[in-house]
Image (spheres, helix red, strand yellow):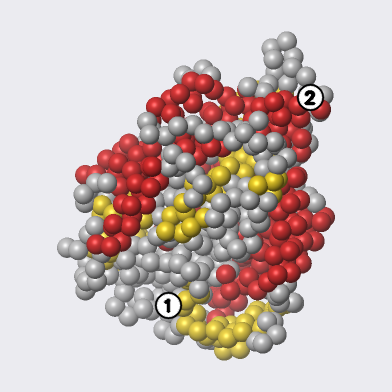
Amino acid sequence: MMTGLSTLKTEGQSCISENKEQKIDRPATETREFSVVEKRRGLYLSKSSKSRSLILLVALLMLAASVVGHAQEPQYGGTLNAIINPEPPILILGLNQQAPTQVVAGKIYESLLTYTFELEPRPSLAKSWDVSDDGLTYTFHLQEGVVWHDGTPFSADDVVFSYDVFLPETHPRWRNIYQHVESITAPDPNTVVFRLKQPFPALMMAFSVDNAPVMPKHIYEGTDFYNNPANQTPIGTGPFKFKEWVRGSYIHLVRHDQYWQEGKPYLDGIYFHVIPDAASRAAALESGQVHMTRGEDVEFFDVARVSALPHVEATVQGWEMYAPLSWIEINHRVEPLGDKRFRQAIAHALDREFIRDFIFFGLGEIATSPINSALPSHAKRLKFYDYNVAKAVQLLDEMGLQPGPDGVRARVKLLTFPYGHVWDRLAEYIRQALGEIGIEVTIEPADAGTWAQRTANWEYEMTLNYVYQYGDPAVGVSRTYISSNIRKVLFANTMGYSNPRVDELFALAAVEQDPEQRQAYYTELQHILVEDIPNVWLLELQFPTIYDKRVHNLVTTAIGNNETYADVWIEQ
């Protein structure tokens, strides 16, 4: 058991001998323009960052892997063995948007579009589209010959039902998008027309499968979506059908022989193996028992070693759509968490350089805004909460939170984030760091289902989270902060944060077509949010996919491992 902040820091430093802890010594209210971030094969590296040899090593490995690849004729057959961690609570993508559900269900369901690494839309269930000159009408022309896994023909009616009925009730991101829609109609079985209330430039970024899965109307129309018996056996249009789910062991998908893309998929099936232990996940990849790991399957401290194995390749591409941003999520209904000075004190008490370098082992950048720096709308010269214990204590003193006889000023509970040991280690660091300023943190363990339920129902004080940004703040950022989205729905504004000017700015930016004015709205918005600090932003995360060299076409789009895998094949 670690007994102090210094102990945790010492252990972290000993794991990477070439890294030296660097502190930022600057006034708490200083504004700072962060260094240019360059994109190199999907890995973001800061020019000003020091002691980043591990990240550079990983980048070189990824670059080398990309160079040795060469075109080959796809082969049919074989089963892909993958890992899913943690086990998803459900596979109905329209009802649950947790990361494990997205990965597995992304092979079962489809949406209208997918996206290139440059975030350009490309066909999926929509083969083409037209946008009117006034930006108010979007017409999608659908693929022909598409059938659901149960053999029922797919049509435009399924799209209208999904986007006009199903998802507005169940999906927090789509609900935010849907408020801009005047009507969704199907003039014929192969055409869907969206008419908007006002221009909404972000609409074309909204049709990835995790944002807007098309659900089967013939199964869900007129039912209780959450309690439909069909939720046990998902039915989609994707290249793989649900076969079997042995809880705690594996999820088995098999080839959809009537898939609309002729000659695809190449694989016979996919097994998603549930392996809770991180060491066992790495060992399974090393031994060849599984073909791939993704995201946090391999612990961050082990990424460089595993990526260097002779039979694997690695990439951090496939996250361009998501630009994941991690934070401490805070329930504003619980005092003193509702006071921004308390949240500011928490931010000053955390050494985020230490978090980046010795907990996430360099795979990330320090977050300075609610908008990831990978997005063009990210603003510079924002107020920066440096690591400053004295400032944190000063803020608590201003609130009148004086230490008691035991040195404790306030007590809070931290609900754990059940997505790997790195989050447990982060929770322990937060507990110790806040303890240094007199905030006693009790860590509450939770599995994935419990975490989702408690967070969605506002039954927490603080928790850890990371959220995808989906290429545009109007799609992936506003949902967290606008007051109209304060709902008991996961990944909505579960914090209960409310600021009328923030609501107004998000609304203005969403419909603004002039890029400079749109940026002006988002810049003002970020200054307000950084001052209010509704949650404590930690890192812009980077996640590797590490896979067997015999596997081809694994990461080909900006949605990465949430893609259908219709093009994936294995050398036999």
Closer to us: 208 or 213: 208
Residue found farthest to the bottom: 188
Determine whether, in the image, residue 16 is placed left or right of residue 455. Answer: left
Determine whether, in the image, residue 424 is placed left or right of residue 169. Answer: left
- Vertical side of 380 occupied by 123: above or below: below
Q: Residue at left 19%, top 63%?
A: 571
Residue 397: mark in rendering: 2
Displayed quadrant of residue 515? bottom right
Displayed quadrant of residue 508? bottom right
Q: Residue at left 31%, top 52%?
A: 61
Discs 2, 1 touching: Cβ within 8 Å: no
**Number of marks present in the image shown:** 2
Q: Residue at left 74%, top 63%?
A: 521
Q: CA distance from mark 2 to mark 1?
A: 64 Å
Amino acid type at circle 1 is Val
In x, y percent, where is residue 8?
Answer: 48, 24
Tag in front: 2 or 1: 2
Q: Residues within 10 Å of mark 2 (few under 14, many from 20)?
A: some
Closer to us: 113 or 30: 30
In x, y percent, where is residue 197?
Answer: 75, 77
Residue 147: mark in rendering: 1
- Vertical side of 31 occupied by 551: above or below: below
* Mark 2 or 1, nearer chain start: 1
Q: Residue at left 41%, top 69%?
A: 238
Tell me the quadrant of the picture where the C terminus can be found: bottom left
Residue 439: mark in rendering: none
In x, y percent, where is residue 514?
Answer: 71, 74
Query: Which element type, helix, strand or loop, lies under badge 2?
Result: helix
